[in-house]
DNA sequence: TCTTGAACCTACAGCCGCTGTAGCTCCTAT
DNA sequence: ATAGGAGCTACAGCGGCTGTAGGTTCAAGA
Protein backbone atom coordinates (compact mmCIF):
# COMPACT_ATOMS: atom_id res chain seq x y z
CA UNK A 1 0.00 0.00 0.00
CA UNK A 2 1.35 3.34 -1.09
CA UNK A 3 0.92 6.74 0.48
CA UNK A 4 -0.18 9.59 -1.72
CA UNK A 5 3.29 11.09 -1.54
CA UNK A 6 4.93 7.91 -2.79
CA UNK A 7 2.38 7.63 -5.58
CA UNK A 8 3.13 11.23 -6.52
CA UNK A 9 6.86 10.60 -6.67
CA UNK A 10 6.51 7.40 -8.69
CA UNK A 11 4.31 9.00 -11.31
CA UNK A 12 5.84 12.44 -11.38
CA UNK A 13 2.60 14.06 -10.23
CA UNK A 14 1.94 16.41 -7.37
CA UNK A 15 -0.02 15.32 -4.34
CA UNK A 16 -2.68 17.95 -4.95
CA UNK A 17 -3.08 16.83 -8.51
CA UNK A 18 -3.86 13.31 -7.38
CA UNK A 19 -6.46 14.58 -4.93
CA UNK A 20 -7.85 16.73 -7.73
CA UNK A 21 -8.16 13.70 -10.02
CA UNK A 22 -10.04 11.92 -7.28
CA UNK A 23 -12.32 14.89 -6.81
CA UNK A 24 -13.30 14.98 -10.47
CA UNK A 25 -13.79 11.23 -10.54
CA UNK A 26 -10.80 10.38 -12.72
CA UNK A 27 -9.13 8.39 -9.95
CA UNK A 28 -11.32 6.19 -7.74
CA UNK A 29 -11.55 6.84 -4.02
CA UNK A 30 -8.79 4.82 -2.38
CA UNK A 31 -8.83 3.00 0.91
CA UNK A 32 -8.06 4.99 4.04
CA UNK A 33 -6.13 4.31 7.21
CA UNK A 34 -7.97 4.57 10.51
CA UNK A 35 -6.68 8.09 10.75
CA UNK A 36 -8.15 8.97 7.36
CA UNK A 37 -5.05 8.96 5.15
CA UNK A 38 -5.23 7.58 1.61
CA UNK A 39 -3.55 4.26 0.81
CA UNK A 40 -3.15 3.21 -2.82
CA UNK A 41 -2.90 -0.15 -4.59
CA UNK A 42 -0.77 -1.09 -7.55
CA UNK A 43 -3.83 -0.70 -9.78
CA UNK A 44 -4.06 2.93 -8.72
CA UNK A 45 -0.41 3.38 -9.63
CA UNK A 46 -1.06 1.94 -13.10
CA UNK A 47 -4.08 4.09 -13.64
CA UNK A 48 -2.32 7.26 -12.58
CA UNK A 49 0.67 6.45 -14.78
CA UNK A 50 -1.68 6.06 -17.70
CA UNK A 51 -3.30 9.39 -16.96
CA UNK A 52 -0.02 11.21 -16.54
CA UNK A 53 1.39 9.76 -19.69
CA UNK A 54 -1.70 10.67 -21.70
CA UNK A 55 -1.46 14.18 -20.26
CA UNK A 56 2.17 14.35 -21.41
CA UNK A 57 0.85 13.55 -24.86
CA UNK A 58 -1.58 16.43 -24.55
CA UNK A 59 -4.85 14.52 -24.17
CA UNK A 60 -7.56 16.38 -22.28
CA UNK A 61 -8.88 14.94 -19.06
CA UNK A 62 -12.19 14.25 -20.80
CA UNK A 63 -10.44 12.31 -23.56
CA UNK A 64 -8.50 10.38 -20.94
CA UNK A 65 -11.66 9.55 -19.09
CA UNK A 66 -13.04 8.10 -22.29
CA UNK A 67 -9.87 6.17 -23.06
CA UNK A 68 -9.97 4.64 -19.59
CA UNK A 69 -13.59 3.61 -20.02
CA UNK A 70 -12.90 2.09 -23.44
CA UNK A 71 -9.93 0.16 -22.13
CA UNK A 72 -12.25 -1.60 -19.71
CA UNK A 73 -13.80 -3.59 -22.57
CA UNK A 74 -10.77 -5.43 -23.97
CA UNK A 75 -12.81 -7.47 -26.44
CA UNK A 76 -14.28 -4.59 -28.38
CA UNK A 77 -12.56 -3.31 -31.53
CA UNK A 78 -10.35 -0.33 -30.85
CA UNK A 79 -12.04 1.95 -33.37
CA UNK A 80 -13.16 4.45 -30.76
CA UNK A 81 -9.73 4.62 -29.19
CA UNK A 82 -8.12 5.30 -32.53
CA UNK A 83 -10.73 7.93 -33.26
CA UNK A 84 -9.85 9.80 -30.05
CA UNK A 85 -6.15 9.62 -30.80
CA UNK A 86 -6.67 10.76 -34.38
CA UNK A 87 -8.86 13.65 -33.36
CA UNK A 88 -6.15 14.74 -30.97
CA UNK A 89 -3.51 14.40 -33.65
CA UNK A 90 -5.54 16.59 -35.96
CA UNK A 91 -5.88 19.22 -33.23
CA UNK A 92 -2.12 19.14 -32.70
CA UNK A 93 -1.51 19.52 -36.42
CA UNK A 94 -3.87 22.47 -36.59
CA UNK A 95 -2.09 24.12 -33.70
CA UNK A 96 1.23 23.55 -35.40
CA UNK A 97 0.05 25.28 -38.55
CA UNK A 98 -1.08 28.26 -36.55
CA UNK A 99 2.07 28.42 -34.44
CA UNK A 100 4.22 28.28 -37.55
CA UNK A 101 2.37 31.23 -39.03
CA UNK A 102 2.89 33.00 -35.74
CA UNK A 103 6.61 32.32 -35.77
CA UNK A 104 6.90 33.56 -39.35
CA UNK A 105 5.10 36.77 -38.50
CA UNK A 106 7.09 37.39 -35.33
CA UNK A 107 10.35 36.79 -37.14
CA UNK A 108 9.37 39.17 -39.91
CA UNK A 109 8.32 41.82 -37.44
CA UNK A 110 11.49 41.56 -35.39
CA UNK A 111 13.71 41.30 -38.44
CA UNK A 112 12.37 44.53 -39.88
CA UNK A 113 13.08 46.56 -36.79
CA UNK A 114 16.32 48.45 -37.14
CA UNK A 115 16.70 49.16 -33.44
CA UNK A 116 16.14 52.90 -33.48
CA UNK A 117 13.68 54.95 -31.44
CA UNK A 118 10.35 53.70 -30.17
CA UNK A 119 8.61 56.06 -32.56
CA UNK A 120 10.03 54.18 -35.52
CA UNK A 121 9.82 50.70 -34.07
CA UNK A 122 8.56 48.25 -36.65
CA UNK A 123 7.23 45.96 -33.94
CA UNK A 124 4.85 48.61 -32.71
CA UNK A 125 3.95 49.63 -36.24
CA UNK A 126 2.96 46.13 -37.16
CA UNK A 127 0.92 45.83 -34.00
CA UNK A 128 -0.82 49.12 -34.74
CA UNK A 129 -1.52 48.65 -38.43
CA UNK A 130 -3.70 45.75 -38.96
CA UNK A 131 -3.13 45.58 -42.68
CA UNK A 132 0.60 44.98 -42.27
CA UNK A 133 0.13 41.67 -40.61
CA UNK A 134 -0.45 38.39 -42.33
CA UNK A 135 -1.99 36.64 -39.36
CA UNK A 136 -5.68 35.96 -39.27
CA UNK A 137 -7.78 36.75 -36.25
CA UNK A 138 -8.20 34.69 -33.16
CA UNK A 139 -9.02 31.49 -34.97
CA UNK A 140 -8.75 29.33 -31.92
CA UNK A 141 -5.91 28.55 -29.54
CA UNK A 142 -2.30 28.81 -30.37
CA UNK B 1 -18.34 58.69 -29.83
CA UNK B 2 -18.73 54.95 -30.11
CA UNK B 3 -20.85 52.60 -28.08
CA UNK B 4 -19.20 49.53 -26.63
CA UNK B 5 -21.02 47.36 -29.14
CA UNK B 6 -19.69 49.32 -32.10
CA UNK B 7 -16.20 49.20 -30.65
CA UNK B 8 -16.54 45.46 -30.27
CA UNK B 9 -17.64 45.02 -33.87
CA UNK B 10 -14.87 47.23 -35.26
CA UNK B 11 -12.13 45.41 -33.38
CA UNK B 12 -13.52 41.91 -33.52
CA UNK B 13 -13.78 41.73 -29.73
CA UNK B 14 -16.70 40.82 -27.54
CA UNK B 15 -18.40 43.40 -25.38
CA UNK B 16 -17.55 41.52 -22.21
CA UNK B 17 -13.93 41.32 -23.20
CA UNK B 18 -13.75 45.09 -23.49
CA UNK B 19 -15.28 45.52 -20.06
CA UNK B 20 -12.84 42.93 -18.76
CA UNK B 21 -9.89 44.90 -20.21
CA UNK B 22 -11.21 47.97 -18.45
CA UNK B 23 -11.55 46.08 -15.20
CA UNK B 24 -7.93 44.91 -15.25
CA UNK B 25 -6.73 48.38 -16.21
CA UNK B 26 -5.67 47.57 -19.76
CA UNK B 27 -8.24 49.93 -21.24
CA UNK B 28 -8.86 53.28 -19.52
CA UNK B 29 -12.26 54.09 -18.09
CA UNK B 30 -14.23 55.77 -20.86
CA UNK B 31 -16.70 58.62 -20.64
CA UNK B 32 -20.27 57.76 -19.77
CA UNK B 33 -23.66 59.03 -20.91
CA UNK B 34 -26.00 60.47 -18.28
CA UNK B 35 -27.59 57.07 -18.06
CA UNK B 36 -24.25 55.43 -17.35
CA UNK B 37 -23.39 53.86 -20.70
CA UNK B 38 -19.81 53.84 -21.97
CA UNK B 39 -18.86 56.07 -24.92
CA UNK B 40 -15.49 55.60 -26.61
CA UNK B 41 -13.14 57.90 -28.52
CA UNK B 42 -11.02 57.11 -31.55
CA UNK B 43 -8.01 56.74 -29.26
CA UNK B 44 -9.80 53.94 -27.45
CA UNK B 45 -10.44 52.24 -30.79
CA UNK B 46 -6.74 52.47 -31.64
CA UNK B 47 -5.70 51.11 -28.30
CA UNK B 48 -8.11 48.22 -28.44
CA UNK B 49 -7.03 47.36 -31.99
CA UNK B 50 -3.45 47.26 -30.78
CA UNK B 51 -4.37 44.97 -27.93
CA UNK B 52 -6.42 42.63 -30.08
CA UNK B 53 -3.75 42.44 -32.68
CA UNK B 54 -1.06 41.69 -30.14
CA UNK B 55 -3.35 39.00 -28.70
CA UNK B 56 -3.69 37.50 -32.18
CA UNK B 57 0.08 37.29 -32.20
CA UNK B 58 -0.05 35.45 -28.89
CA UNK B 59 1.32 38.13 -26.57
CA UNK B 60 0.14 37.85 -22.97
CA UNK B 61 -1.89 40.67 -21.47
CA UNK B 62 1.07 41.48 -19.22
CA UNK B 63 3.38 41.77 -22.20
CA UNK B 64 0.82 43.96 -23.97
CA UNK B 65 0.55 46.18 -20.94
CA UNK B 66 4.29 46.66 -21.07
CA UNK B 67 4.31 47.29 -24.81
CA UNK B 68 1.65 49.95 -24.38
CA UNK B 69 3.62 51.64 -21.60
CA UNK B 70 6.81 51.58 -23.66
CA UNK B 71 5.06 53.02 -26.68
CA UNK B 72 4.21 56.09 -24.62
CA UNK B 73 7.86 57.21 -24.70
CA UNK B 74 8.46 57.56 -28.43
CA UNK B 75 11.94 59.04 -27.99
CA UNK B 76 13.47 56.10 -26.16
CA UNK B 77 15.31 53.37 -28.04
CA UNK B 78 13.13 50.37 -28.77
CA UNK B 79 15.42 47.85 -27.11
CA UNK B 80 12.85 46.84 -24.51
CA UNK B 81 10.15 46.39 -27.11
CA UNK B 82 12.37 44.15 -29.18
CA UNK B 83 13.28 42.18 -26.07
CA UNK B 84 9.61 41.46 -25.36
CA UNK B 85 8.98 40.40 -28.93
CA UNK B 86 12.05 38.21 -28.98
CA UNK B 87 11.21 36.55 -25.72
CA UNK B 88 7.80 35.77 -27.11
CA UNK B 89 9.31 34.42 -30.32
CA UNK B 90 11.55 32.13 -28.30
CA UNK B 91 8.56 30.86 -26.35
CA UNK B 92 6.72 30.17 -29.60
CA UNK B 93 9.73 28.31 -30.98
CA UNK B 94 9.99 26.21 -27.84
CA UNK B 95 6.33 25.32 -28.09
CA UNK B 96 6.78 24.38 -31.71
CA UNK B 97 9.58 21.98 -30.86
CA UNK B 98 7.44 20.33 -28.24
CA UNK B 99 4.38 20.13 -30.44
CA UNK B 100 6.40 18.58 -33.24
CA UNK B 101 7.64 15.88 -30.91
CA UNK B 102 4.06 15.35 -29.87
CA UNK B 103 2.90 14.98 -33.46
CA UNK B 104 5.67 12.52 -34.20
CA UNK B 105 4.75 10.40 -31.20
CA UNK B 106 1.02 10.48 -31.92
CA UNK B 107 1.61 9.52 -35.52
CA UNK B 108 3.84 6.64 -34.52
CA UNK B 109 1.33 5.43 -31.95
CA UNK B 110 -1.60 5.59 -34.34
CA UNK B 111 0.37 4.14 -37.23
CA UNK B 112 1.36 1.07 -35.23
CA UNK B 113 -2.20 0.20 -34.31
CA UNK B 114 -3.55 -2.47 -36.62
CA UNK B 115 -7.18 -1.85 -35.71
CA UNK B 116 -7.90 -5.08 -33.86
CA UNK B 117 -9.32 -5.52 -30.39
CA UNK B 118 -8.92 -3.10 -27.51
CA UNK B 119 -6.75 -5.63 -25.74
CA UNK B 120 -4.13 -5.38 -28.49
CA UNK B 121 -4.47 -1.69 -29.18
CA UNK B 122 -1.08 -0.07 -29.59
CA UNK B 123 -2.43 3.27 -28.55
CA UNK B 124 -3.34 1.97 -25.12
CA UNK B 125 -0.12 0.01 -24.88
CA UNK B 126 1.98 3.07 -25.52
CA UNK B 127 -0.03 5.02 -22.98
CA UNK B 128 0.42 2.26 -20.41
CA UNK B 129 4.08 1.51 -20.91
CA UNK B 130 6.12 4.48 -20.18
CA UNK B 131 9.26 3.13 -21.74
CA UNK B 132 7.69 2.85 -25.17
CA UNK B 133 7.21 6.54 -25.54
CA UNK B 134 9.82 9.01 -26.67
CA UNK B 135 8.17 12.03 -25.15
CA UNK B 136 9.64 13.68 -22.09
CA UNK B 137 7.49 14.59 -19.13
CA UNK B 138 5.42 17.65 -18.71
CA UNK B 139 8.17 20.09 -19.55
CA UNK B 140 5.88 23.07 -19.77
CA UNK B 141 2.92 23.89 -21.98
CA UNK B 142 2.25 22.43 -25.32
C1' DT C 1 6.92 4.90 25.53
C1' DC C 2 7.18 9.39 24.21
C1' DT C 3 8.32 13.05 21.16
C1' DT C 4 9.27 15.18 17.20
C1' DG C 5 8.50 16.71 12.59
C1' DA C 6 7.52 15.27 7.97
C1' DA C 7 3.74 14.07 5.62
C1' DC C 8 -0.98 13.94 5.50
C1' DC C 9 -5.87 16.03 5.82
C1' DT C 10 -9.87 19.53 4.28
C1' DA C 11 -11.45 23.64 2.32
C1' DC C 12 -10.90 27.21 -0.39
C1' DA C 13 -8.68 30.96 -3.28
C1' DG C 14 -6.03 32.02 -7.40
C1' DC C 15 -3.89 31.50 -12.04
C1' DC C 16 -5.06 33.11 -17.47
C1' DG C 17 -8.17 35.14 -20.59
C1' DC C 18 -12.02 35.30 -21.24
C1' DT C 19 -17.33 33.74 -21.64
C1' DG C 20 -21.93 33.24 -20.05
C1' DT C 21 -25.89 34.21 -17.06
C1' DA C 22 -29.47 36.78 -14.39
C1' DG C 23 -31.92 40.57 -13.66
C1' DC C 24 -32.05 44.89 -14.31
C1' DT C 25 -31.92 49.90 -17.01
C1' DC C 26 -31.26 52.86 -21.06
C1' DC C 27 -31.58 54.63 -25.71
C1' DT C 28 -33.57 55.15 -30.06
C1' DA C 29 -36.70 54.29 -33.89
C1' DT C 30 -41.33 54.06 -35.00
C1' DA D 1 -45.65 56.42 -25.94
C1' DT D 2 -43.79 52.16 -26.52
C1' DA D 3 -41.16 48.31 -27.85
C1' DG D 4 -37.08 45.94 -28.01
C1' DG D 5 -32.23 45.92 -28.90
C1' DA D 6 -28.37 47.25 -26.50
C1' DG D 7 -26.36 48.49 -22.40
C1' DC D 8 -25.45 47.94 -17.23
C1' DT D 9 -23.49 45.29 -12.73
C1' DA D 10 -22.18 41.32 -10.37
C1' DC D 11 -20.86 36.99 -10.25
C1' DA D 12 -19.98 32.00 -11.63
C1' DG D 13 -17.52 28.86 -14.66
C1' DC D 14 -14.15 26.96 -18.08
C1' DG D 15 -9.39 23.67 -17.90
C1' DG D 16 -5.99 21.87 -15.22
C1' DC D 17 -4.01 22.45 -11.89
C1' DT D 18 -1.27 25.05 -7.83
C1' DG D 19 -0.83 27.26 -3.44
C1' DT D 20 -2.25 28.48 1.22
C1' DA D 21 -3.99 28.09 6.03
C1' DG D 22 -4.74 25.63 9.81
C1' DG D 23 -5.23 21.45 11.61
C1' DT D 24 -4.20 15.94 12.26
C1' DT D 25 -1.68 11.52 11.71
C1' DC D 26 2.10 8.50 11.26
C1' DA D 27 6.63 6.53 11.79
C1' DA D 28 11.33 6.86 13.28
C1' DG D 29 14.56 7.93 16.81
C1' DA D 30 15.71 8.81 21.98
Image (tube, coloured by chain):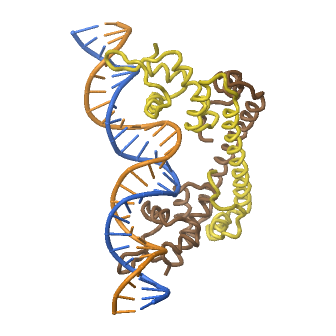
Chain colours: A brown, B yellow, C orange, D blue
Residue B16 image offset from top left, x and y in percent:
44, 31
Where is residue B98? Give x, y as percent. 70, 52
Q: Is residue C15 above or below residue D4?
A: below
Residue A95 lies in what quarter of the image? Answer: top right
Figure label count: 0
Q: Residue at x 56, y 54 (%)?
A: A60
Front residue of C3 and A83: C3
| A86 sits left or right of B111 in the view | left
Q: Is residue A82 visible?
A: no
Q: Position of residue A138 (x, y in %)?
A: 59, 33
Query: Which image quarter holds the C terminus of chain A?
Result: top right
In depth, the one of A26 and A5 nearer the eye is: A5
Q: Position of residue B2 (x, y in %)?
A: 46, 15
Q: Is residue B12 above or below residue A91?
A: above
Give the left or right position of residue A66, taking residue B130 as reference: left
The answer to whether A17 is drawn above or below residue A95 in the figure is below
Task: Tell me, yes or no, if residue A2 can be seen here.
Answer: yes
Identify the residue at horizontal 36%, vertical 75% (top origin).
Answer: A36
Is D7 placed left or right of A83 in the picture?
Answer: left
> What residue lies at 59% left-to-right and 24% top-to-bottom?
B72
Residue at x-position 70% and y-position 70%: B131
Q: Is residue A141 above or below residue B2?
A: below
Amino acid sequence: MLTIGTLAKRTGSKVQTIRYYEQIGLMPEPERTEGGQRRYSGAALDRLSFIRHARDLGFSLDAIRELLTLSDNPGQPCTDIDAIAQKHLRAVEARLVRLEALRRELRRMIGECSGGAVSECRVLEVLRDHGECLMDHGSGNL
